[in-house]
Image (cartoon, rainbow, N blue to C red):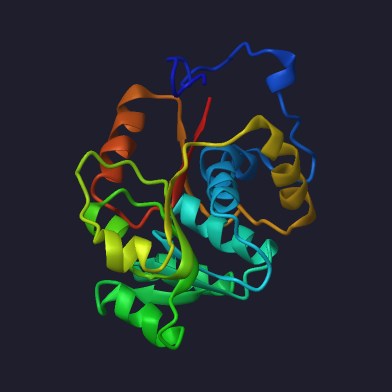
Amino acid sequence: MLGHHVDGGYAEFIAVPARNAISLPDEIPFEAGATLMCASATALHALRKGRISAGETAAIFGVGGLGLSAVQLAKAMGAVEVYAVDIQQDKLELASEYHAVPINASRADAVEEIRKLTKGRGVHVAIEMIGLKKTMEQAIDSLGNLGRAVMVGLNQQPISVNAYTQIIGKEAEIIGSNDHLLSELPLLVEWARRGVLDTSRVVSQVIPLDAEKINQRLDDLEKFTSDVRVVIAP
């Protein structure tokens, strides 16, 4: 994938095979459309990997650019309740406007809150989008019977799992999810065109194609700033 497995994503012009090009409808502005790939598409793929279905519940750990899309997409795919977990209050407030139940992990134990809100049952699907050992373990611990924890956040640290109580006893699953599939994009773009998915409010900054500014934003990601998503405009 260009920009992932192969260098070349930060450029004014990129040549790609025609079969890989997805047209952006006139109804979707450039800034909003720019977040559809490495944000919304990643969230959609993770939810599909987690096999979210109508009537189920979901917990989204991390409601930045990916998480805010995951909240909306989980609702669109039939989730009756979506719990948004983060430590940034402004992100939680935005998630609540997308009809998620906010859980501020800096003020309470996220797993305990999810257990309380689900009357002890836990959730059907947990999506981890931060890439921290703690939140990965919390995502697994928040599952109910037959639950699926989908790991999206990048993390090099080993995590601890109690095989019997967390996985075998519940018949739960831990699933890896990496980016998205080309076949998923037409549905995603159509949902954005119809307003089922709103990405206009997740863009907190638009910066030029400038190495210093781009590197600064990449450094900021490690600091978990309040910015949601930044778009680079060539």
> In the image, residue 193 lies at what x, y percent?
77, 49
Q: Nearer the viewer, residue 29 or 167?
A: 167
Relative to 20, say whether 124 is above or below.
Answer: below
Q: Residue visible at 38% across and 81% down? A: 115
Q: Nearer the viewer, residue 13 or 192?
A: 192
Q: Nearer the viewer, residue 140 or 165?
A: 165
Residue 148 is left or right of residue 105, and the answer is right
> In the image, residue 78 lies at what x, y percent?
68, 67
> In the image, residue 90 lies at what x, y percent?
40, 68
Residue 214 is left or right of residue 98, and the answer is left
Q: Residue visible at 23% across and 49% down? A: 223
Q: How many marks?
A: 0
Q: Residue visible at 59% across and 42% down? A: 41
Can I make out residue 94 in this image?
no
> In the image, residue 221 lies at what x, y percent?
30, 44
Q: Residue visible at 47% across and 37% down? A: 178
Residue 84 is left or right of residue 158, and the answer is right
Can I make out residue 172 in this image?
yes
Relative to 48, say whether 88 is above or below.
Answer: below
Relative to 115, say whether 224 is above or below.
Answer: above
Relative to 232, say whether 87 is above or below.
Answer: below
